[in-house]
Each structure stands twice: as C-alpha cells, then as structure tokens.
C-alpha cells in the first residue's frame, strides 16, 4: 500500500468501526428498547414493530412423551416429512426417519389444491413405509406442521396465510387456513392423520431445546434469517382473548427481525442495502445481524475502498458491484484465516470477487472489516436475548433459576468468532454472577423434530 492510499482505506475502516460501535451502554439501550417493543406488541395487535405472535403452544414437551409422531416441514423449494418414535424418559428419541421432497416449480405458482395434493401424496407414500408395527391400529396418526410463511393463527391447529414469501405465489391460498387445506388433501389421499399443531421453526427450536433440557426458555434462529420465541406467562399477554390456558404459559413468536430503534448502530452501508432490498424499511434488526446480509455489508465496504483507492485494481474488472456475491461462509473463512500470509483471504478475494495480487496489508484490512461487521452482529443478537431475559424476569439480581437459550442456524453453528462474541457479550451485559445461570445451546432441527415434539405435547 502506498502511504496516501493506505490512509484513505484506513479512514474508511475507522469510520466503519465508529459507526458499528456497540459499547455496553448502547447494547443496554437496545435491550431496553427490545423489552419495551415486546410489551407493546403483547398489549395489542399492531402495537409494536415486532408482532409478538401468539403461537397457541401452551405446552412444551417434557421428555415423557411416548409413541410415533409425524412432522411436515414446509419452508422453501423442498419439504421434509419425518416420523419420530418417542420412548419416554429413558430413550428419548428412539427412532427418527425422514424424507426430503423437491417441489416442482409449476406447483409453486399454481393453485393451493395442487400443491397440498402433492404434499399429501408424499405423506401417504411415507406412511406406507411404516412397516408392520401396529401402533396406529386403534388411534389416529398426529402431525406437527412447520409452515415457514407469515400466518395469522387463531388456535394451535389453524392459521390463515397472510402472504407468500420466497419463490411461492399461489394466490388462492392467501387468506385461507393452511391446516384445513392440508387436512382436506390428506383425506383425499386416504391418509388418516390429524394436524395437532401448526408452528414456525423458531417455536420448534424452543420445543426441541426444551425436550432435552427443561430449563430452556428461549429459542433463537441465527442463520440466513433471525427470529426468537420464548415462554411467556399467559397472564402477561393483554391481547390474549378467552380463558387462560391451564399451563399458565404461552409461547410467543416475537418476529424480532423487524425490530427497529434509534439506538441501533446503522451505517451508510446498511441504509443502502435496505433501500435496494425487496422489503425496504422492514426487518432492520435482521438486516444487521443475520447470515443473509453480513457478506454483502462487507462487500459494500470493500467497494467504497475500491472506488477511492487502487488497492483492489480496476473496479470494473472485479465482482465488487455484484450484490450478495460475498456470502457469510466466505467472511467466516476469511475471519478465521490463521495462515501466515492470509492465503485463505487471498483465495476468497480471487475466487468470489476476482480481486488478485493484494498485499498482506490489504488482506489484513479485509479481515478487520469482516471482524467489525461480525462483532456488531453478534453483540446485537446478544442484546436482543438480554431484552427477552429481562422481560421475563430472568438472569436479574435475585433470580436463582437456570435459563437456557436454544439456538439453531448456521451463523451460530459454523461461525466460531460469532458464537464466542455472542457468549462473551451476554456475560458483559448480565454481569459475571447472573451470567452463570444462563447457557446457550446449539439445538438443531427445530423445524422437523420440534414440530413432531409439539404434536406429541398437544396429542389427544
């Protein structure tokens, strides 16, 4: 790096560091704002940026459940069907089989009956593979249905589709009850099965965590997207109509990705990313912390440096202007590069961005940018978790209970620097003493296993 160019690049990095700063005082403001939005969302529908959706899951699995239960996980271009055998306290999950099925593209924009008929026929095939165990001779099969699209739920086993996301656009399904559609399709295929629960993957993560550890109170997704669900006292939900559940509890799906507050450290890069996104002004918290966006924030910083200095060569010969060309696994690999000459960084820059012949100094700067963006993400996620803990009176002075956070998602599972930063931040915000009662646990497959477990917990 020539001195002048280095100074320009260094200034961009310094400005980024200042704009992404998350000192403890700021994170406490974020946690307080999260708690306030949660309360507002529980008071009335539409009362908050975060929806605080009532899941109607009032019982989580205890580990005593027994029998065979099914799950259907529909959230993208594939769906999965699962059969789980639960063996009570001793064996826990005794057996687990699953099958993944690709949805033909024409069914993703056809009509509801065709899509659900296709799903029900796959379920029917899966059921015939049960073999000769006669466990269902005298009782109906029960299914947990994970449906990862926005629905308005009115009970544990009904919900109307608000809108499709991802690659789906089936107009006649919008405003309809997706459970009724599935139930009808299963009936036509001769599948004797009752949908016991309709859930989303975050609620499933909470259930899968609780099944293995009775102290789990929060489920968080930190992957491509981000969300959190937690166990609330039913009496603390003013908008909950009708009589309170016997358990006294209710799982709330916060939809925290849409959280927004003036105390969030939003940079020029985040603003540009948001403006160019499919949903400008929405999902601001998610855009700061989830795996879908981190790589692109880093790319935008590198592009700014490339436009002001010749460090990355001729911009038009690179891929720096291509949105989402840099993914979170790439920045994770660069951030964790421990080779003396940062050869992994050189490789990723060449491979993904067509940037070659960088100096070691420049590669060090790239690692630093990855680190700044990752740390902000992990620290904000930790502040969100602290907001939820404080809302339910956990990990506060005088609270002796153990509080476990079940987390699923590749960002948490595969990006060690992210995970370590999140855990360290929890200690910093809660204090050494209170933090001893909080544990964060990787909990996989909430959308599959979690759905079967909730079906078991709400079994008739």
Image (spheres, rainbow, N blue to C red):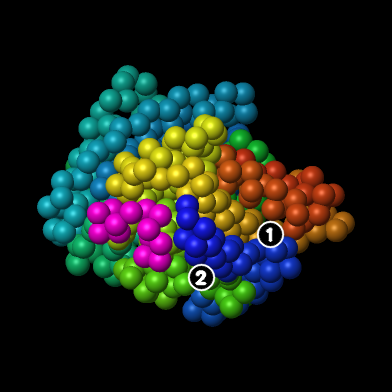
Q: Residue at x 63, y 57 (%)?
A: 379
What x and y, as percent, mark residue 441? Answer: 62, 40
**Is 115 placed left or right of 65 in the picture?**
left
User: Magenta segment, which residues?
Assistant: 306-319
Check residue 267 in the rendering and tell me which mark sits there, or answer none.
2
Single out the residue that lies furthest toward the right.
398
Check residue 73 in the rendering and tell me which mark sits there, or answer none.
none
The verdict on residue 38 being magenta is: no
Check residue 386 in the rendering and tell me which mark sits there, or answer none.
1
The verdict on residue 312 being magenta is: yes
Q: Residue at x 80, y 59 (%)?
A: 396
User: Can residue 410 be seen at all in this image of the molecule?
Assistant: no
Asked if residue 10 is positioned above or below residue 69 in the image, the reply reads below
User: Can residue 276 be seen at all in this image of the molecule?
Assistant: yes
Q: Residue at x 51, y 70 (%)?
A: 267
SS state under label 1: helix
Asked if residue 325 is positioned above or below residue 7 in the image, the reply reads above
Count of numbered labels shown in the rendering: 2
Residue toward you, 7 or 198? 7
Single out the residue that lies furthest toward the top.
132
Asked if residue 192 is positioned above or below residue 15 in the image, the reply reads above
Asked if residue 168 is positioned above or below residue 90 in the image, the reply reads below
Residue toward you, 175 or 248? 175
Q: Earlier in the sequence, mark 1 or mark 2?
A: 2
**Is 312 placed left or right of 376 in the picture?**
left
SS state under label 2: loop
Residue toward you, 38 or 183? 38
Q: Quadrant of residue 420?
A: top right
């Amino acid at each position: 790096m020539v001195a002048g160019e280095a100074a320009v690049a260094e200034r961009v990095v310094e400005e980024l560091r200042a704009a992404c700063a998350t000192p403890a005082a700021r994170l406490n403001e974020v946690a307080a704002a999260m708690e306030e939005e949660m309360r507002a969302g529980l008071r009335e529908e539409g009362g908050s940026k975060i929806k605080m959706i009532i899941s109607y899951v009032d019982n989580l699995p205890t580990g005593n459940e027994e029998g065979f239960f099914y799950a259907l996980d529909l959230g993208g271009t594939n769906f999965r069907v699962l059969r789980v055998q639960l063996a009570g306290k001793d064996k826990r999950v005794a057996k687990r089989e699953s099958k993944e099925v690709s949805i033909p593209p024409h069914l993703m924009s056809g009509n509801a009956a065709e899509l659900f008929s296709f799903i029900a026929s796959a379920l029917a095939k899966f059921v015939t593979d049960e073999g000769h165990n006669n466990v269902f001779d005298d009782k109906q099969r029960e299914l947990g249905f994970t449906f990862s699209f926005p629905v308005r739920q009115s009970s544990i086993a009904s919900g109307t589709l608000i809108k499709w996301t991802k690659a789906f656009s089936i107009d006649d399904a919008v405003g309809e009850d997706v459970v009724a559609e599935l139930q009808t399709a299963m009936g036509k295929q001769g599948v004797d099965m009752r949908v016991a629960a309709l859930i989303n993957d975050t609620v499933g993560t909470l259930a899968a965590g609780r099944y293995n550890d009775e102290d789990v109170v929060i489920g968080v997704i930190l992957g491509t997207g981000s969300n959190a669900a937690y166990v609330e006292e039913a009496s603390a939900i003013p908008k909950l109509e009708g009589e309170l559940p016997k358990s006294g509890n209710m799982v709330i799906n916060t939809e925290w990705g849409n959280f927004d507050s003036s105390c969030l450290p939003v940079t020029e890069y985040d603003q540009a990313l948001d403006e160019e996104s499919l949903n400008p002004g929405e999902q601001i918290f998610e855009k700061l912390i989830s795996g879908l966006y981190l790589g692109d924030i880093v790319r935008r910083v590198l592009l700014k440096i490339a436009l002001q200095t010749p460090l990355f060569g001729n911009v038009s010969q690179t891929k720096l202007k291509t949105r989402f060309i840099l993914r979170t696994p790439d920045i994770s690999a660069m951030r964790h590069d421990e080779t003396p000459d940062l050869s992994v960084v050189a490789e990723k820059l060449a491979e993904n961005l067509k940037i070659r012949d960088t100096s070691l100094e420049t590669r060090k700067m790239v690692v630093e940018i990855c680190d700044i963006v990752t740390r902000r993400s992990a620290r904000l996620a930790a502040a969100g978790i602290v907001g939820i803990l404080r809302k339910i009176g956990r990990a506060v002075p005088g609270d002796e209970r153990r509080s476990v956070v079940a987390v699923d998602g590749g960002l948490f599972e595969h990006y060690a620097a992210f995970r370590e930063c999140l855990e360290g931040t929890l200690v910093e915000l809660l204090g050494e003493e209170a933090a001893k009662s909080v544990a964060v646990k990787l909990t996989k497959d909430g959308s599959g296993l979690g759905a079967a477990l909730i079906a078991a917990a709400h079994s008739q």
